[in-house]
Structure formats: C-alpha cells, structure tokens
C-alpha cells in the first residue's frame, strides 16, 4: 500500500507540476445517457500556446461519466481531435524559430486517476513556415497510437 501511495503522489506531482497549459472549457455534448450518474461526454476546450501568443488550439476529447467518472477514477478513452488557428500576431521566440524546442509539450490533461494523460506537443516546420500541433494519449505502460494534428501557417499582419 505504501508503494501505491508513493506512486500516486509522484504521479500527481508530475501531472500538476507540469508547465503545460490548461484549457478553458468551451462546450460539451452528451454521448451516452446514464440515469443516476453523469453522462459520458465529449468536451471541447480552448487553450493558447503558452510560448506563442496568437496561436490558439481547440481540443475535443471524451470524458467518461457514470459513478466512476463522477468520483474521478474512470479512465477516459484515447479519442481526441485538435484544430489550431492563428488568432493574433505571431512572433516566434528564438528557441522555437531555430528548432531547439521541437516536440515541446504545450498542453497536458490527466485522463485517468494515475497513469494516462492527453497531451499536445508543438513542432516548427521552418521550411514551410508552419507550426504543427500533435495531440496524443499516453499511458505509462501501453500508450495509444490514436493521434491528431493541426497546422498553423504563420501569416504576417
């Protein structure tokens, strides 16, 4: 039991201590009705890239309902979709513009009690002058190949 508590605390600290952004919930739709507990849902969240002002992503993902979902122990599916857009003037910071920060995590959200999370990482394609955002789900032992990408062309205002 002591090992379980230590693992739980380490996981919680790692997840909560991450510099990645948290999304603002934009809306939700129910996908499965449950009589005496919360419905299963698809949640839509928006988040701004913390290092690139003017880039905003919209992420949709599943949230399990039921009793386990209500008390926070359900494991959400790995299904997610992302769409990112330029919403203002974009000036790339030096580390991103020269490719040093490729694969930087910009969003992370826990999708199970302990070991599963939904993440978004950023890449910069200098040749095409676009920012690429990749969303995927990971799990400590067995991740999912389900993923989604979105590309933001950098336009000069």
Image (cartoon, grey):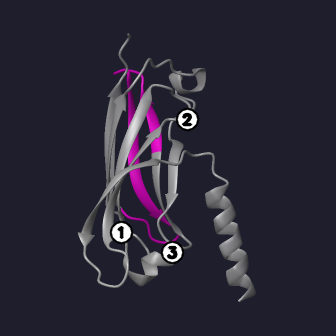
Question: Looking at the image, which residue is at 75% across and 86% down?
Answer: 2
**Residue 100 placed where, x, y %?**
57, 30
Dividing the image into 4 quarters, which one contains the C terminus?
top left
Question: Looking at the image, which residue is at 43% across and 76% down?
Answer: 69
Q: Quadrant of residue 65?
A: bottom left
Name the outermost residue toward the top: 157
Looking at the rendered structure, which numbered label has been put on residue 157?
none
Q: Rounded to the nearest whole Å, what is the CA distance between mark 3 and mark 1? A: 14 Å
In the picture of the structure, the residue carrying the numbered disc 1 is: 77
Magenta residue check for 69: no
| Residue 2 versus residue 135 in the image, above or below | below
Name the outermost residue toward the front: 36
Task: Label 1, secondary structure: give it.
Answer: loop
In the picture of the structure, the residue carrying the numbered disc 3 is: 72
Task: Label 3, secondary structure: give it.
Answer: loop
| Residue 9 versus residue 106 in the image, above or below | below
**Residue 138 placed where, x, y %?**
46, 62
Q: Rounded to the nearest whole Å, what is the CA distance between mark 3 and mark 2? A: 27 Å
* First in sequence: mark 1 vs mark 2: 2
In the picture of the structure, the residue carrying the numbered disc 2 is: 50
**Residue 31 placed where, x, y %?**
24, 68
Asked if the residues shown at circle 1 and circle 2 are in contact, with their CB atoms under 8 angstroms apart, the answer is no
Question: Looking at the image, which residue is at 34% across and 52% down?
Answer: 27
Q: Nearer the viewer, residue 141 or 4?
A: 4
Residue range (magenta): 121-144
Asked if the residues shown at circle 3 and circle 2 are in contact, with their CB atoms under 8 angstroms apart, the answer is no
Q: Rounded to the nearest whole Å, what is the CA distance between mark 1 and mark 2? A: 26 Å
| Residue 1 versus residue 69 in the image, above or below | below
* First in sequence: mark 3 vs mark 2: 2
Task: Say few, some or many: other residues with alpha carbon within 10 Å of mark 1 (under 14 / 14 to 19 / 20 or more).
Answer: some
């Amino acid at each position: 039991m002591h090992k379980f508590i230590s693992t739980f605390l380490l996981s919680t600290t790692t997840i909560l201590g991450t510099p990645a952004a948290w999304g603002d919930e934009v809306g939700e739709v129910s996908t499965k009705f449950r009589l005496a507990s919360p419905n299963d849902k698809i949640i839509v969240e928006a988040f701004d890239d913390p290092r690139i002002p003017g880039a905003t992503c919209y992420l949709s993902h599943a949230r399990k309902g039921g009793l386990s979902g209500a008390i926070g122990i359900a494991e959400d599916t790995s299904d997610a979709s992302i769409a990112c857009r330029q919403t203002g003037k974009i000036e790339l910071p030096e580390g991103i513009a020269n490719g040093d920060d490729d694969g930087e995590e910009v969003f992370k959200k826990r999708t199970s009690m302990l070991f599963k999370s939904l993440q978004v990482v950023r890449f910069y394609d200098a040749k095409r002058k676009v920012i690429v955002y990749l969303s995927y789900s990971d799990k400590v032992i067995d991740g999912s190949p389900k993923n989604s990408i979105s590309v933001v062309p950098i336009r000069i205002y």
